[in-house]
Amino acid sequence: LHQMRESDGLIVSTPYLKEVYSEYNQNIHVIPNSIDFKLWDRVKQKNKKGIRIGWAGGNAHGKDFEIIETVIKDVIEKHKDVTFVFVNGPAQNGLPQGLKGLPQVEHHALWTPILKYPQMLGNMDFDIYISPLVDSAFNRGKSNLKWLEAAALSIPCVASDVGNFKETIHDGIDGFLAPNAFTFRSHLELLIGDKKLRRAMGQNANTRIRQEVNTDITIKRYVDILEQQTMVSKDFLYKTATA
């Protein structure tokens, strides 16, 4: 809090964070998390059998996956060609207890250097990406990074209708928003049964983020803000020194 109050300005990744932190600093700029296509365009994806529904992330999402635990069980019971693939979390011990030992549930404990992360994700060969989130202050503060990573690989994403997902995903066009378990299930069923929809939605997302949140674009916003802030700070120091 002291650092935020004393800073000349802040850069945050979502409008929600700007709103929350405005109590401590009025000079806040929003620059969204972005994709470096110089890395992601090099990714070579494999061609594994069946339909792979994936998730990757840290181990603080146990509560989030309670939203769709029943959905996962129902889907794998109905569709024998579907596998749910988890990389690292989402629970403290890897998989949530209710998903351990289930057929068609695959778990990989792979902590990967950040520059190798895109290829690692590509190696999983996801056909659909999921990102369930409980509607909490912590999750509303998260960016839409999981949707961006899926979009970078032209993979359709089904995400909770929460926070930055809700602000950025065009529902039904470049992703699906799911306010509850029932909607998660219906969106997954639709994508599982329609390969053309999977491809179109993934491509729509990829095209959009190339135009809007490509690092080649957002880096210029960083430069503009930092140069502007530097000029303001220098002017303030000059006036203070000559007063």
Image: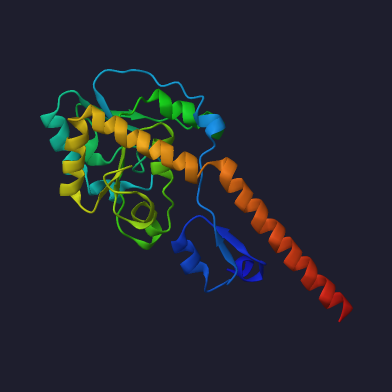
The C terminus sits in image quarter:
bottom right
Query: Residue at (42%, 26%) from the top-left corner?
Result: 122
Q: Which quadrant of the figure has residue 188?
A: top left
Residue at position x 54%, y 30% in the image: 39
Type of colouring: rainbow
Q: In the image, residue 47 lies at what x, y percent?
A: 34, 17
As displayed, is residue 148 above or below residue 13?
Answer: above
Residue 30 shows in the view: yes
| Residue 167, picture quadrant | bottom left
- Image point 32% across, 29% down: which residue? 107
Among all residues in the image, which is located at the extreme bottom? Answer: 243
Which residue is located at x 79 percent, y 66 percent? Answer: 234
Is 243 left, or right, of 227 in this rendering?
A: right
Which image quadrant is residue 45 in? top left
Would residue 232 appear left or right of 88 to someone viewing this image? right
- The spot of residue 220 in percent (x, y) is 63, 48
Residue 86, how many percent across, how many down? 33, 33
From where the camera sits, is residue 83 visible? no
Closest to the observer, 73 or 131: 131
Residue 214 in percent (x, y) is at: 52, 41
The quadrant in which the N terminus is found is: bottom right
Of residues 82 and 89, the one drawn nearer to the viewer in this rendering: 82
Question: Front-most of 218 and 95?
Answer: 218
